[in-house]
Image (tube, rainbow, N blue to C red):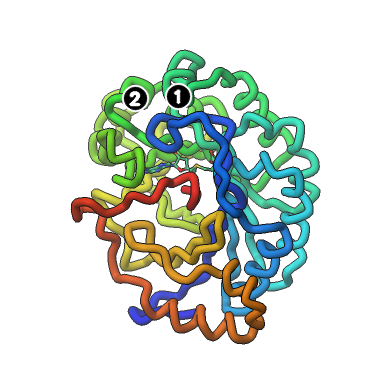
Amino acid sequence: MTDSFGRNIDYLRISVTDRCNLNCVYCKPENKWESHDILTADEITRICGIFAGLGITKIKITGGEPLLRDDICGILKKIRALPEIESLTLTTNGILFRDMANEILRCGVDSVNFSLDSPDEEGFCKITGKSGIADVYAGIRKALDLGFKSVKINFTAIRELNYDRIIPIARMAEKYPVWVRFIELMPMGSGRNFTPVYTDEVKKILEDEFGVPKKLEVSGNGPAKYCQYGDFAGKIGFISPLSECFCQDCNKIRIASGGELILCLGHEKSVNIKELFEKNISDAEITKIIEEKIKEKPLNHNFFRKNLNETEMYHIGG
Ligand code: SAM
């Protein structure tokens, strides 16, 4: 599937719930369950099937916290059974991961991302409003033991919240074969109340501590750029949507938990596919609608325009 700027769109991130068991202050600060009408398991797998037919080969399951869904394993298995899908990955806060890890691996998940914005309990509680770092570590350890293709730790660098955790989180890649990735905070939803730490500054902090890294040619499904620091067991990556806009190479679309197609994080929602299902529109017709909508995928995000981006990330997933 190609958009009107010639970009090959082969990566779908689908949010399977807007519920989360953490209340990260920059993401979902209120301690309440959402009452949105979210996609059913059948709708999720039907959407994935339609997109697989359109050329999507990589799917990431996100949320909210995907592991809160009782039917998550059934969803994963059905997506894995789609012959076009080459890569199935999952992002989680890790709280529930350890006990589900064997089953998740059996469902055919290739790689797991753990979102972790502080490597210690004090920082973890400050950001998430909950305790639980021991559970997250147990999950990461289990993922490593089970041999998932890659185990990534995503750290959203936020000046007011975890600036002093940049070196400690990088040390996780010093000790373990994990890919620690520093992500620039995007001005979306509650994230607009905080200040991003740009990649250049993170790199300077790491270089002062660990020396000049070697650039790596590794590429994943997305826009991260990777480096090797010293004799670290793992890699360090940088995802820089603000300081190194990678929109020209964007290969991604998203489905929010309510079924809305999101062509770009910095823009309005597009068509709601759940609503099309409810109107009994056939898959063939929905395919045509999506092909038309893809042409509206904008060239760039618009994060620097004021009063936009009210959408909360927990509806869309990261
Ligand atoms: N519960 C899952 C998890 O923890 O990975 C998925 C949901 S969470 C919304 C996914 C990712 O989005 C997290 O890594 C979080 O840090 C990131 N995120 C949330 N708000 C963000 C923002 N404004 N800018 C950049 N990343 C953000």
Q: Nearer the viewer, residue 118 or 309?
A: 309
Distance in Å between CA atoms under marks 2 and 1:
9 Å
Give the total number of marks visible in the rendering. 2
Whether the residues at callouts 2 and 1 have beta carbons within 8 Å, the answer is yes
- Which class describes the residues within 10 Å of circle 2: few (<14), some (14-19), or many (20+)? many
Task: Estimate the x, y position of residue 226 in percent, counting from the top left.
Answer: 41, 46
Expressed as whole percent of the image width and height from the top left, the position of residue 306 reads: 19, 52
Report if residue 236 is visible in the image: no
Single out the mark in the foreground, 2 or 1: 2
Q: Is residue 312 left or right of residue 247?
A: right
| Residue occupying the far top of the picture | 122
At mark 2, the secondary structure is: helix
Based on the displayed image, in which of its 4 quarters is residue 146 positioned?
A: top right
Residue 213 found in image quarter = top left
Asked which secondary structure carries label 1, the reply is loop
Q: In the rendering, at what x and y percent does residue 61 appear?
A: 60, 52
Q: For label 1, count other residues whose C-alpha is less than 10 Å away and answer few (under 14), some (14-19) or many (20+).
A: many
Up/down of 271 relative to 230, above or below: below
Name the residue rendered at 62%, 19% in the picture: 134
Q: In this orientation, which residue lies closer to the viewer: 4 or 229?
A: 4
Whole-percent x, y for residue 223 in the image: 41, 56
Label of residue 129 in the image: none
Q: Amino acid at mark 1?
A: Ser
Residue 88 higher or lower than 19, as above or below? below
Residue that numbered label 1 is attached to = 118
According to the picture, the residue beneath numbered tag 2 turns out to be: 161
Is residue 137 at least partly visible in the picture?
Answer: yes
Q: Amino acid at mark 2?
A: Leu
Q: Which residue is found at the position 78% from the left and 54% from the top?
A: 74
Q: Quadrant of residue 298?
A: bottom left
Residue plotted at (38% across, 42% down): 183
Left or right of 85, for residue 316: left
